[in-house]
Image (cartoon, rainbow, N blue to C red):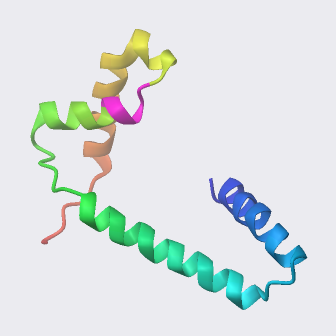
């Protein structure tokens, strides 16, 4: 969640502040890391056919692949896909 992510960012920034790094230098570093992350996401992302049931199941299975889901995996995947399809909004692009 946002609170956990914020806490992690602050825990990384604290030692830098203790070493007298200026906050703007730290923020500049975080922004550079953000840009690198976004560039990587754009490079490795691919278009998904949301009407391809097998492709959707593969993605959802990878996302919720835990010990808990091993018993109920198939059912959880189907429920997740149906739930998303109920609330999704189609865009023109």
Q: Which region is colored magenta?
A: 61-65
When the figure is inspected, residue 51 is found, relative to residue 6, above or below; the finding is: above
The dominant secondary structure in magenta is: helix
Res 8 → quadrant = bottom right
Q: Compared to 68, does 43 lie above or below?
A: below
Relative side of 2 to 81, left or right: right
Q: Nearer the viewer, residue 87 or 63?
A: 63
Check the image and report above or below for 3 versus 13: above
The image shows residue 56 at horizontal and vertical percentages of: 21, 37
> Is 79 on the left-hand or right-hand side of 29?
left
- Where is residue 31? Give x, y as percent: 55, 80
Foreground residue, 23 or 79?
23
Asked whether residue 14 is drawn in magenta, I would say: no
Would residue 15 be found to the left or right of residue 76 on screen? right
User: Residue 9: where, in percent of width, then height?
Assistant: 70, 65
Most distant residue in the top direction: 71
* Name of the residue lying farthest toward the right: 18
Q: Nearer the viewer, residue 86 or 84?
A: 84
Residue displayed at 34% across by 32% down: 62
Residue at the spot x=33%, y=38% of the render? 83
| Residue at the image point whose x is 79% and y is 89% from the top | 22
Q: Nearer the viewer, residue 79 or 19?
A: 19
Split into 4 quadrants, where in the image is the C terminus?
bottom left
- Residue sitting at 23 percent across and 31 percent down? 57
Measured from the top left, where is residue 37 in percent x and y?
A: 43, 67
């Amino acid at each position: 969640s946002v609170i956990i992510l914020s806490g992690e960012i602050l825990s990384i920034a604290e030692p830098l502040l203790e070493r007298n790094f200026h906050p703007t230098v730290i923020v500049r570093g975080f922004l550079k890391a953000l840009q690198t992350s976004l560039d990587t996401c754009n490079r490795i992302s691919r278009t998904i056919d949301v009407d391809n049931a097998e492709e959707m199941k593969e993605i959802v299975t990878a996302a919720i692949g835990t010990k808990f889901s091993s018993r109920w995996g198939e059912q959880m995947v189907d429920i997740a896909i149906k739930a998303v399809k109920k609330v999704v909004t189609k865009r023109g692009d």
